[in-house]
Amino acid sequence: MPQPVDMLMPHQPPMRWVDRLIHCDDTTATVTACFGEDAFCVRDGRVLETALVECMAQAVAAAAGHRARLRGADASPGSAGGGMLAAVSDVRIVGRVEWGQTLHIKVRELKRLGPMLLVAGDITCDGEPIASGELTLYV
């Protein structure tokens, strides 16, 4: 099932940081991301922590685009209804990532109330935990 995310979400370079959707079902999704040395969120050879939170949010966007396609809806970049990261909580950064390393970002829906969605996210690199947290999104 791995597929590029470029037609699943509205994010475009240089702000599209996730690259492949690896898994997606009704409530969970996994994507990958790999930052180049020249990415604006790389400083001193390392990925900034704030970029990790954005990667979790982009995983949610990629999953939403994939699910829309499965329903027969247009999920192309120009057609997306949009979404917005509304809140971040309980984020824990436990590891550092250097440019060129592949991140695996997993998100899981916890609660949905109307247009608000609460998700838990986990990021690993080479099987080691890097970050975790909860995001509230307006979708």
Image (cartoon, helix red, strand yellow):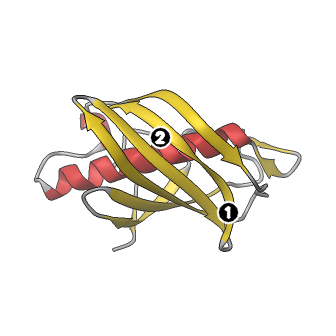
Residue shown at 20% from the left, 49% from the top: 68
Q: Is residue 96 visible?
A: yes
Direction from residue 54 to residue 10 in the image, left or right: left
The residue to which callout 2 is attached is: 12
The mark closer to the camera, 2 or 1, is 1
Say which quarter of the image contains residue 61.
Answer: top left
Classed neighbour count for the residue bearing mark 1: other residues with Cα under 10 Å, few (<14), some (14–19), many (≥20): some
Residue shown at 32% from the left, 41% from the top: 111
Between 52 and 92, the residue placed more toward the observer is: 92
In primary-sequence order, the first of circles 2 and 1 is 2
Q: Position of residue 45 (x, y in %)?
A: 85, 52
CA distance separating discs 2 and 1: 27 Å
Q: Position of residue 76 (x, y in %)?
A: 27, 45
The residue to which callout 1 is attached is: 129
Residue 40 vertical position relative to residue 97 in the rendered view, above or below: above
Q: Position of residue 109 (x, y in %)?
A: 35, 49
Give the residue type that dot 2 points to: Gln
Residue shown at 63% from the left, 63% from the top: 124
Direction from residue 93 to residue 28 in the image, left or right: left
Q: Is residue 13 visible?
A: no
Residue shown at 39% from the left, 59% from the top: 29
Q: How many marks are shown on the rendered structure?
A: 2
- Helix or strand or loop: what does disc 1 sit on? strand
Residue sticking out furthest to the right: 44
Give the residue type that dot 1 points to: Pro
Classed neighbour count for the residue bearing mark 2: other residues with Cα under 10 Å, few (<14), some (14–19), many (≥20): few
